[in-house]
Amino acid sequence: MLGWFGWGGDHKTYSPGELRDLMREHKKSVVLVDVREQNEWVGGHIPGAVHAPLSRFAAAVADIPKDKKLVFYCATGMRSRTAISYANKLGLQADGHLGGGISEWRRHDFPVKR
């Protein structure tokens, strides 16, 4: 599938409900990665997510296991698509991203940790 930024690759766009279910069912094999900046992260993030800002992505994901599938999210879904491309280049297993980002997650009244 060809992404918005011209990069190819197979990835899934998760709805908030699908992501919530994925994290419940596959907690040990999936890592949820927030690629927003620090000021966005402290304003609220999805419980269980790790923080890897896109602006310093390569350094931030260095500690994430390469044997886990990664699902990314940002504010609206644009930066998370870019993160998929970066992750693939770093040899990580990018599974997909949260469509609409945390904005859509919040719209569904799903939990946010501060």
Image (spheres, rainbow, N blue to C red):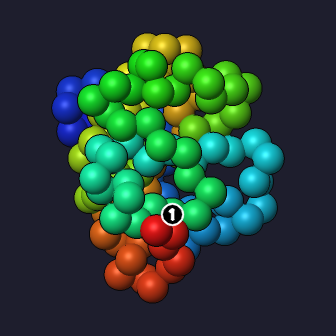
Seen in the picture, residue 62 relative to 18 is either above or below; the reply is above
Is 50 displayed left or right of 13 in the figure? right
Q: Is mark 1 on a helix, strand or loop?
A: loop
Q: Mark yes or no: residue 77 visible.
A: no
The residue positioned 28% from the left and 53% from the top of the image is: 39
The residue positioned 30% from the left and 56% from the top of the image is: 40
Q: How crowded is mark 1: few (under 14 residues within 10 Å), some or many (20 or more)?
A: many
Most distant residue in the left direction: 5
The residue positioned 53% from the left and 33% from the top of the image is: 94
38 or 33: which is nearer to us? 38
Quadrant assignment for the N terminus: top left
Rendered location of residue 36, percent (x, y): 32, 47
Is 61 displayed left or right of 57 in the figure? right
Rendered location of residue 102, percent (x, y): 37, 64
Q: Mark yes or no: residue 26 visible.
A: yes
Rendered location of residue 79, percent (x, y): 27, 42
The residue positioned 34% from the left and 52% from the top of the image is: 74
Asked where in the image residue 84 lies, by quadrant, the reply is top left
Most distant residue in the bottom direction: 109
Q: Name the residue under label 1.
A: 46
Seen in the picture, residue 95 relative to 40 is either above or below; the reply is above
64 or 16: which is nearer to us? 64
Is 109 displayed left or right of 22 in the figure? left
Q: In the rendered picture of this protein, how many numbered marks are placed on residues?
A: 1
Rendered location of residue 32, percent (x, y): 56, 48
Asked where in the image residue 20 lies, by quadrant, the reply is bottom right
User: Looking at the picture, which amino acid does disc 1 mark?
Assistant: Ile
Asked where in the image residue 104 lies, by quadrant, the reply is bottom left
